[in-house]
């Protein structure tokens, strides 16, 4: 038997109530801040018909969020609270203090998301789902929430499994989820950073210039820079690419080998089941 639960029942209820509110508040704050930054200092000239594209991207995000909330009302935090109650997981077995288990959980969950991302590129079946994200013909903050709902469901299942296996504390899981949301919006932003600042920042966080390479139509560039939050895994596993071959202003954004690009919400939901979605 592992050590007793860290969270009392009242604290558990508080965390479950806090999780959706905190995630939504941080999402809206970062979304608005990045949209303002993109308007004030864009990195690339935006493509035409931005409004309809952004509406579709945000519509996909709303649909995926609603589906996840129906299937997993407590989300990954619920998995952490269950593991805490039952004494499951590596960190629980080691009786690691919160001061150690929280940052460890954030780092290891980020590694798990990196592995998931690489797997979605490597598997022909999973690539069909992930293609919806790469089929965006432009790159801005709304690209950071453009995912097929089935991919989001599979991602949540993977995160819950990792959370339970680790015995990650609920506080660490909640912190990770908030950070992942915020950094996904940040690193998909069409926002200009001074190049000297970008070179420094990308040692600690994935910057827009670093992640934009991943959205190139060239497959050798698409299969690089998989990190969403921490940039270290790409450097460690040899998937890091500093710059796109054509430069950031001239590079072509989109899915390798996909033409024409589906644009409507229904077309994107159906894209994984179409013949041209094969890798």
Image: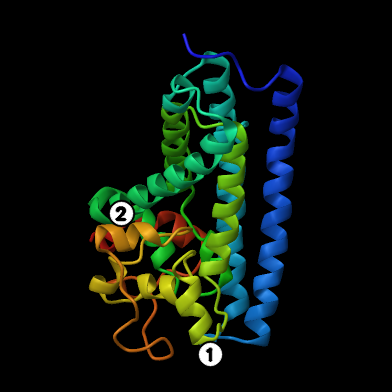
Q: Quadrant of residue 80?
A: top right
Which residue is identified by label 1? 45
Please, what secondary structure does the residue beneath circle 2 have? helix
The residue where tag 2 is placed is 118
**Residue located at (50% from left, 72% from top):** 201
Query: Residue 183: image x %, image y %?
Result: 55, 61
Horizontal arrangement in the rendering, residue 107 relative to residue 186 (left or right)? left
Name the quadrant containing residue 199: bottom left
Horizontal arrangement in the rendering, residue 48 relative to residue 245 (left or right): right
Residue 182 visible at all: yes
Q: Nearer the viewer, residue 45 or 197?
A: 197
Q: Depth check: 134 or 225 in front?
A: 225
Indicate the quadrant where residue 136 lies.
bottom left
At horizontal 45% and vertical 43% (from top left) the residue drawn is: 109
Q: Nearer the viewer, residue 167 or 46?
A: 167
**Residue 235 in the image: x percent, y percent?**
31, 63
């Amino acid at each position: 038997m592992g050590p007793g639960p860290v969270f009392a029942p009242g604290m558990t209820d508080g965390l479950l109530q806090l999780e959706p509110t905190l995630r939504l508040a941080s999402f809206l704050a970062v979304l608005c801040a990045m949209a303002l930054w993109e308007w004030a200092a864009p990195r690339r000239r935006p493509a035409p018909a931005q409004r309809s594209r952004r509406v579709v991207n945000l519509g996909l995000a709303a649909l995926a969020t609603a589906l996840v909330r129906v299937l997993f009302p407590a989300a990954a935090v619920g998995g952490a609270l269950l593991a805490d109650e039952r004494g499951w997981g590596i960190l629980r077995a080691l009786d690691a203090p919160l001061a150690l288990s929280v940052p460890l959980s954030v780092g290891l969950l980020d590694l798990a998301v990196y592995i998931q991302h690489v797997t979605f590129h490597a598997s022909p079946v999973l690539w069909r789902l992930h293609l919806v994200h790469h089929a965006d013909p432009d790159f801005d903050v709304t690209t950071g929430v453009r995912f097929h709902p089935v991919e989001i469901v599979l991602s949540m299942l993977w995160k819950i499994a990792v959370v339970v296996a680790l015995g990650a504390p609920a506080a660490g899981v909640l912190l990770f989820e908030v950070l992942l949301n915020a950094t996904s919006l940040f690193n998909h932003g069409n926002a200009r950073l001074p190049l000297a600042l970008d070179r420094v920042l990308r040692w600690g966080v994935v910057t827009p210039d670093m992640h934009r390479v991943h959205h190139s139509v060239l497959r050798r560039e698409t299969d690089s820079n998989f990190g969403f939050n921490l940039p270290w895994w790409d450097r460690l596993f040899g998937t890091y690419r500093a710059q796109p071959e054509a430069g950031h202003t001239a590079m072509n954004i989109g899915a390798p080998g996909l033409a024409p690009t589906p644009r409507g919400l229904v077309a994107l939901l159906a894209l994984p089941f179409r013949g041209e979605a094969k890798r």
